[in-house]
Image (spheres, rainbow, N blue to C red):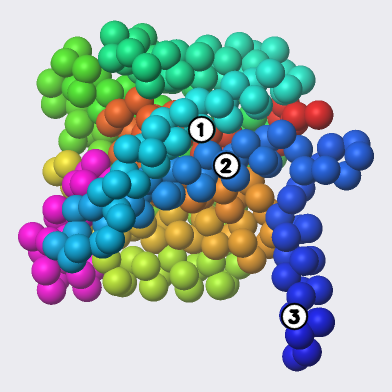
Amino acid sequence: MTVASSSESGTGFLNRLSGPFESDGAPSVRTVAGGVAAVAVLAMALLRAAVNSPLSVPGAADAYPVVRLAALALPALAALAVGVRTDDRLERVGLSFAGVFCLLATVSAAATVPAAGAVVAGGGLAVATRLDRNRRWLTLARAAVVAAFLLAATLALGESMGVFAGGRTAGTTLALLGLAALPVTASPPRAAWAAGGTSFALVVLAGAVAPFVTGAVVLVEAAVVGAPLVLVALGVGGGVAAATTGAVRGNAGWLFGGLLLLAAGVPATVPRALAVVLGLGLVVGVGGETR
């Protein structure tokens, strides 16, 4: 393969990823906002791993405050951007509500509890409007995944906010089940199943070889509490399969949405919950497209 053909292939892949489009051919607000949020959340996850690693990663600690602020603010701004431009009134209300309160929570801890409620209620409303109701079984499957994640957020955030006890473990289980079931709603190609299966095997292997280290990593990275190793591995495999489906098919929604859901982990904090809502909005349907 020549250098020119390689360049053309790479350009074609980027063009396929940039849909849906505006009327002038530019990527839609939903695509751009989802990509920005996914990069910010994924960067935070990687930096969190670097900071907590036993190995010394140069510059990781210095970069942490900046990247953390970006991971808090950019998804909130992404929610506002999509909310402002969507044609669906309910999605506009839900995402704007969640985005505004999450921005407030980045500057004042007093807004954290209202932001948690805004993300679950407003985000849930926005995601519900995105469900594609034209294919019955697919709608039911995706609705089940959405319900699992939103209930997970309600339970995990409820314990984190001190509303009730015992919700974190149940929320972890529901979030991992939702992540594991995600590929079923996407009809992944073989490459995605292979990537997901490999990820599953690697997590199981890591847990068998170094159980304490693996447990610490999934707690710090994904906020996982009280879940068996097999369920964690299923969740990771499902998230990788979903993101790989988007990469292989050139579908920006599944690529960015899968990365958001995978990097967010258990929605036990407001930023994690907002990332989950944004990820779900990218993968569950076609309604309320941005202009």
| Left or right: 64 as drawn, with respect to 167 | right
Q: Mark 2 and mark 1: span between their CA atoms? A: 7 Å
Q: Quadrant of the N terminus?
A: bottom right
The quarter of the displayed image where residue 58 is located: bottom left
Q: Which residue is mark 3?
A: 6
Residue furthest to the left: 212
Identify residue for label 1. Answer: 74
Whether residue 222 is in magenta: the answer is: yes
User: Residue type at mark 3?
Assistant: Ser
Identify the residue at horizontal 57%, vertical 42% (top origin): 36
Measured from the top left, where is residue 75 in percent x and y?
50, 32
Q: Which amino acid, by three-letter code, is at mark 1?
A: Leu
Asked whether 26 falls inside the magenta stretch, the response is no
Which numbered disc flags the more N-terminal residue, 1 or 3? 3
Nearer the N terminus, badge 2 or badge 1?
2
- The residue singled out by tag 2 in the image is 36
Q: Position of residue 246 (x, y in %)?
A: 61, 57
